[in-house]
Amino acid sequence: MLAQHQFRQLRELVGHAVASVPFYRGHLKRASIFAIGGVTPISFARWPILTRADVRSAADALNATRLPPGHGPVTWNSTTGSTGQPVRVANSEAGLLYHAAVILRSQLWYGLDLRARLGAIRPAAAEATHANWGPPTSLAFDTGASCTHGISRDPTEQFDWLCREEPDYLLSMGHNLRSLIEESVRTGRRPQKLKALLSYADKPPPDLRQLAREVWNVPVFDTYSAGELGPLALQCPQHEHLHVQSESVLLEILRDDGTPCAPGETGRVVVTDLHNFAMPLIRYELGDYAEAAAPCPCGRGLPVIGAITGRASNMAVDPSGRRFWPLLSPKFWLDTPITQRQLVQKTASRIELRYVAATALTPAQETAVAAGLSRTLRYEFDYDFVRVLEIPRAPGGKYQEFVSEIIR
């Protein structure tokens, strides 16, 4: 039944795109699709993949020349994602309404006390206090106050702000949340009122939930989102996997040959925003990889993502050709003087470790770190240790712990 509703909406979107969006006429012709007819799961699988490069090069050709009645004014949003390649996306008021509905659903799913104090550390946010949580929540409910802080500020400054403001809930990117927990471990201080952490935008570090429970005794609720498309999947309130928000998007997880992944398989994430008629993104490849999963026993009936496994640009490769996403435990770093780090793969056998520390590592410490990394990565890479003053965030505020210069 859910798929039927999705494809009914998809037919409206496709018909609008073919009639009103110049880009898709050439896009379909290049893919030898000359007549759409009825859009079915079989015919839709032939629709060509839309890449980030397509969106950048298409410019105004992806904008609809007209909108259906009732879709409201158009809003523009710029996003860089983890790639650093800026993309400018238009959305209609009707499309953004679905994004807002998913955000409200997440807060209700997780049983948040909307009268409590919300803290948020985001890109470009100013340090400030506010009378309510802001839209969309405050448009539908009477909420408590909120406070904001900028994610570009030093983690020690962020942590001081957190302990001073004492919010009940803290919203930020997953890696930023982990850096705050690490600061708590180092200083022995902790926020006293936190009830939950709300992770969004980037792939949460693998040990974030465990650290949050052990150090702060709070759960983590994750939202999988993209700047171009809004919230895509919400963590199940009863499990750690994610439910695709299928009323808003059609999300595919595809093998290299373009066929759908079976539960337990990992593939490319391709998404269609079902309600953005201002700039339709149809079968848009995010650059993320995810694990398909079986239906959830919670009974919600929405498709399940087992895990977001990473981006291609954040994969490592060894000289044998083995590709993998490095899962680097934060506990490993807590035993070193390193307060912030980034691994950059230069060649198949060499990795540069950029690190922030009060003093340079001694040769013995470098040897110990290299040995620990080799055990974790299952290959004895050659490591170049480079001490720096800070590790800059990627455009968009995301922090990348591992960056490949040989896989793009």
Image (tube, grey):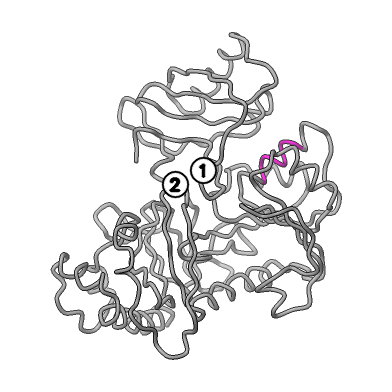
50 and 110: which one is in front? 50
Q: Quadrant of residue 341?
A: top right
| x then y, percent, for residue 286 | 40, 56
Say the numbered circle drawn on residue 357: none
Which residue occupies the extreme top position in the image? 363
Pick the quarter of the image with the C terminus.
Answer: top left
At 43% from the left edge and 61% from the top edge, which residue is drawn?
A: 88
Residue at the spot of label 1: 394
| x then y, percent, for residue 247 | 48, 77
Q: Amino acid at mark 2?
A: Gly
Check whether the beta carbons of the residues at disc 1 and disc 2 lie within 8 A of each other. Answer: yes
Q: Is residue 258 left or right of residue 164?
A: left
Q: Amino acid at mark 1?
A: Ala
Q: Examine the structure image and report whether residue 218 is included in the region drawn in magenta.
A: no
Magenta segment: 177-183
Badge 2 element: loop
Residue at the spot of label 2: 84
At 49% from the left edge and 22% from the top edge, which residue is drawn?
A: 374
- Identify the mark nearer the N-term, 1 or 2: 2
| x then y, percent, for residue 344 | 46, 30
